[in-house]
Amino acid sequence: MRFTPARYRTFAIWALIALSVIIVSGAAVRLTGSGLGCDDWPRCSSEKLIDVSSMHAAIEQLNRLFTGVVGAAVILAVLGAYRRVPFRSDLPTLAWLLVFGVLLNAIVGGISVLVDLHPMWVQSHFLISMFTVVIGTMLVRRAGEPDGVPRRRMVDGATEKLVWVHFALSCLAIFTGTIVTGSGPHAGDETAVRLDIKISTAAQIHGVSVVSTIAVAVVLAVGTMRNRRTKVAIQQALSRWMAIGVAQALLGYAQYFNGVPALMVGFHIVGSIGVMWASTLLLLDTRRAMVPVDEVLSAELVRT
């Protein structure tokens, strides 16, 4: 069996969707207090492999079972990369990184249960998930690029460096967000320990990282107004990030001043997936597989 580039890109999209959905389902486990609904791993308990006798156990069990869907999606991405015609060596590398991320997260998730949801392990579980979103986004983009066309820098060197700074700050904002989670009320279980830091202090640290990221995005936006080539290259991705990033920041402040309700936290987690997806696309737009003719280049970028 052989796959066309378009079909393989569909496989990559499926993998990215599955990796995103399991983050949301994992958040549902934590926000409903079901983190220890199954108190063992990989079995649900010492007596049962699968247990849906209680709501907490059923929620945790469904999240674990969905890991099988994620595993199937990333395995299909790997196998498809080797059966894609024509073959491209960059695609299997990215697909294998997804497998690595999923396996590592399964191990870390299991340890999280065995250490009674210690926040450091729960944070690691979430951050690895964000890593798979970044790699999955890269795989979708690369799978959609034309074969045999060199990847060229689309912006000037200073702008590219600033986009890298923006990406790093986006990652920092995600990391500081997990500190807020580790010190906040939604631990996944009433008995789980919390980080020894006030949630107000954690929220302030997170807020500084978020505002810094938005500030760099504003600087990038001003720069695109002065350079037509840069504007054509990254304006769409930057506008997308600004919409998601600002909405995410406003939601974060709203949930904090409303007592951190579980439903708003859930939407905030969905927003964090969007932030990493948009940040990765913005970074990828600084270098594209394009022909070296400015007129054709501009027309292609406008269409996409």
Image (tube, rainbow, N blue to C red):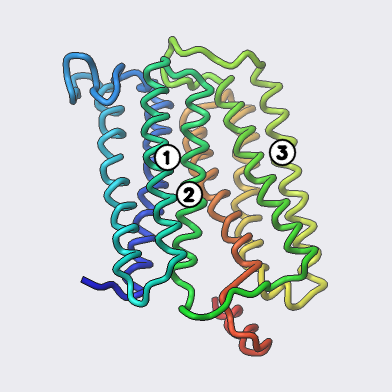
Q: Is residue 156 depicted above or below 171 in this figure?
A: below
Q: Which amino acid does label 1 sit on?
A: Ile
Q: Which mark is residue 23?
A: 1
Q: How crowded is mark 3: few (under 14 residues within 10 Å), some or many (20 or more)?
A: many
Q: Is residue 62 depicted above or below 69 in this figure?
A: above
Between the residue at mark 1 and the residue at mark 3, the CA separation in whole angstroms equals: 22 Å
Residue 207, x across and y down, in percent: 71, 35
SS for callout 3: helix
SS for callout 2: helix
Residue 249, x across and y down, in percent: 65, 42
Taking the spot 68% from the left edge, 87% from the top edge, the residue there is 294
Q: Which mark is residue 155?
A: none
Q: Residue 209 carries which label?
A: 3
Q: In which quarter of the image is the C terminus?
A: bottom right
Asked if labels 1 and 2 touch by Cβ distance under 8 angstroms, the answer is: yes
Q: Residues within 10 Å of mark 1 (few under 14, many from 20)?
A: many
Q: Residue 133 carries which label?
A: 2
Taking the spot 62% from the left edge, 28% from the top edge, the residue there is 256
Q: What residue type is labelled 3?
A: Ser
Between the residue at mark 3 and the residue at mark 2, the CA separation in whole angstroms equals: 20 Å
